[in-house]
Amino acid sequence: MLSQRVTSHRDAAQKQDDRDDSRTGSLGAEGHAGAENAQLVPARILFAEDDKELRTLVAMRLRTAGFDITEAASGGELMDFLVDTVQPDGTVALFDMVLSDINMPDFSALDVMTCVPCCLRDTPIVLITAFGDTATHERALRLGATAVLDKPFRLDALTGTICDILAKMQARPPAAPFTETAI
């Protein structure tokens, strides 16, 4: 099912790129758009970004590419969405991916990753940051981020990264159930 969703998103993203390119008179990366399948369920992405204009722009582009986007305006909202959707086995039921700015009010995305790792065990995490120093990238990857992108970024590159990660995730077996250990 996820493979169908990823293919659908790639096709939708390519169509958007083709439409964008047609306005400038050039061809898209592949030069054509893929076939549509209206019966596919869109991949669900939880997107946290405190900059309202950027959140609106990215969410609109991802929706155009065929993703189902839930928006959070702060680290606190991100944490609430994750905790509210965790299942007994430790998986996050509502989201196929988390896309988040790192530095936000309440909690940073890194704080959220540290506080609720059980909620993010099988969920790929893509982080975006305006403060893309090496130490931040290394810490994010150590905490479990799948990718870290620096602002400014191209919307088509972000969409491509999301599609690539979702495609890789479908081939990976799920992690063992989370169990807390006393320290």
Image (tube, rainbow, N blue to C red):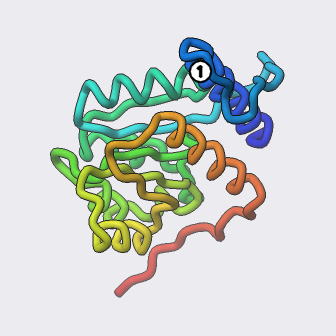
Q: Is residue 144 above or below residue 16?
A: below
Q: Is residue 111 left or right of residue 88?
A: left
x, y percent for residue 107:
21, 52
Residue depicted at x 48% and y 58%: 147
Q: Is residue 94 above or below residue 53?
A: below
Left/right placement of residue 28 relative to residue 150 reads right
* 133 with respect to 18 (left or right): left
Circle 1 residue? 21
Give the camera-side residue of 67 and 112. Answer: 67
* Picture coordinates of residue 59, whole percent (x, y): 43, 27
Q: Position of residue 117 (x, y in %)?
A: 43, 64
- When the figure is inspected, residue 179 is found, relative to residue 163, above or below; the finding is below
For the point 43% across and 69% down, which residue is it?
141
Quadrant housing residue 181: bottom left
Q: Give the position of the C terminus as an image quadrant.
A: bottom left
In the image, 173 versus 180, the foreground residue is: 173
Describe the element under mark 1 as helix, strand or loop: helix
Q: How packed is label 1: few (under 14 Cα within 10 Å), some, or many (20 or more)? A: some
| Snapshot quadrant of residue 173 | bottom right
Q: Where's residue 17, x and y in %? A: 60, 25
Q: In percent of the image, x 39 and y 83: which residue is there?
A: 182
Q: Quadrant of the N terminus?
A: top right
Tag 1: amino acid: Asp
Residue at the image point whose x is 73% and y is 28% from the top: 11
